Image: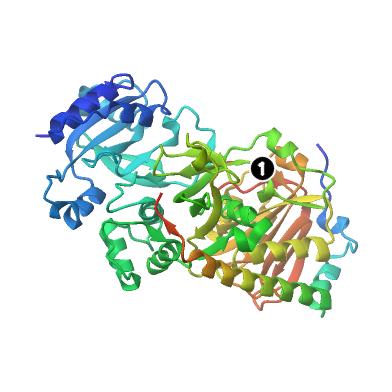
Amino acid sequence: MKKNEDIFKKSKHSDPEAVIERLLKKSDSFDTKMKEVRRDYIRKSANSEKNASELVLNS
Amino acid sequence: MISQEIHSKNNLPIALENSFQGFFNVKIPIRQEIENFIKNLKDVTFFVIEHPYVDKVYRDSYYYYFSSKLNYYPRDCIKVSIFAKTITIDDFYSVEKQQELQDNYRGFFVIRPTYPALFGRSIIDKRALKNNEFLITESEFNTTCNGLKFYVKGFPYSSQDSETITCAETSLWGVMEYFSHRYAEYKPLLPSKIVDTLKIISFERQLPSKGLKYGDLSYALKEFGFGTRIYTRQDFKDEFEIILASYIESGIPTIIAASNNDNIHHALVCCGREKLTESHIETIDERAIMIDFNSIKKRFVFVDDNHFPYQISSLDRPCHYYPSAEWKKSRIEQIIVPLYPKIYLEAYEAREYCKYLLFEVLKFKQITYRLLLTSSRSYKDEIIRSVDLPREFKEAVASVPMPKFVWLCEISDKQLLKNHKCSGTIMLDATEPNIFRYKPLLFVHSGNIFMHKNGNGNLEHKKLPLSLDEYGIYKNNLMGF
């Protein structure tokens, strides 16, 4: 079986401190991506509620 | 006097027809319906027919609706208990045989006097079926046969009577019956309660039922204590089936709306999936940058009130087991997920967050991740009870403060999955919908690194004495893989 490698060894920065730093420091791409996810989710969610309400299930 | 008869599978259709005609004083033949219903059960199955039987669901419909008709409707039912081996009436009175009876007890089904909608409240143990290579979320139910108490695990089933309960009400009832027998927070549901709950938003009479709107189902579940979420294929597109699969992987029975966009709009419950084999895992493309386990093609288990419980079908053609071409064309258009009300972080956002974390922050490539919701108590319990995991890892997991429900993301690959193993874990706080940075993150583990949030909400990490490169995947939700 293929020996699985350590997640942090596989990453560009082998030091977990670096991973933590990447999570803590201000990162435009992280913030931008999550804002986009949130916006998408809210839109899809609101549309789902609207689109679902009129269908009568009785078969 | 209560009448009892024991019959083999071959004799049941005739015997039950005789009981039905005699007890309900009608001349309706039901042999064919019984044959169709029990055909999926193992050939060596024995049945105890008992009547009169008071079924709480039918009795509620009777007093609320059927008793007000001119035509006579009996208020009692017939109960059929299922056993996996030959039994005799003497076995029930022999103390030595009673445990053996329980070991071979496989549940029950109820025959209502509402022809052609015969089958009432039923709980059938999947071990009674010829093909039981599937996993379902199930509750334990206490019941009796010939005065002796038994328990059975299964997912609740009832056919619609089409007057007080249609597919929508039976799906709602099944979900509530499941949750109320599993968690103290929820109460079992009767047909009259559905009518009472929805009367405030109904503009017409509710009985005889002409079905429920999807919004009605969601509203009712919300009133019964859930933080309901609705997803539509139209809005969630490619993620729709993945989201549904992740909730099934989480052991959450989900109400499905299947439609052919013409004359069929049907509600049914998805409560499990088939067991996975190497051939399922082989479909993973190792060259892909990242594979969501929940996107792997597999078949799911449906409880459909028009068919015997535990129908197995794919998500793209959920009604393929219907003989009619019209039904076979039906697709899942919408789902309603009955979530615990404090689960604020739902599947779509949890998945997107994990993907970003794995790919952009942890810089992973060519992995498979498996995302599911579980209770932190069950997760910690499974970890701490494991005979394979080192104590340091157990202590690390046990010391992380967690809410009641968490999102578990297991990091794996094709080879590891074939052995039911993963190589790392990301755990998210299901009460934290703020997905910016590390807000929902509870811990990340891989190798000898355990990164977690401390009591002040800040991230820190510790090194485990030994590298833990692979360990068993979590199986508690569906009790298997």
Could you say whether the residue bearing mark 1 is in a helix, strand or loop? loop
Q: Quadrant of the C terminus of chain B?
A: top right
Q: Quadrant of the N terminus of chain B?
A: top left
| Side of B331 relative to B93 (left or right) | right
Q: Horizontal and vertical percent for residue B179?
A: 41, 55
Count of picture labels: 1
The chain holding disc 1 is: B
**Which quadrant would residue B419 be assigned to in this image?**
top right
| Side of B276 relative to B41 (left or right) | right
Residue that numbered label 1 is attached to? B297
Residue B247, above or below B414: below
Which residue appears at 53% of the width and 53% of the height? B261
Nearer the observer, B14 or B104:
B14
Residue B280, above or below B84: below
Nearer the observer, B240 or A13:
B240
Nearer the observer, B263 or B229:
B263
Res B204 seen here: yes
Q: Amino acid at mark 1?
A: Lys
| Side of B209 relative to A59 (left or right) | left
**Which quadrant would residue B107 be assigned to in this image?**
top left
Q: Horizontal and vertical percent for residue B331?
A: 56, 49
Q: Horizontal and vertical percent for residue B445?
A: 73, 58
| Side of B344 relative to B414 (left or right) | left
Which residue appears at 18% of the width and 29% of the height? B19
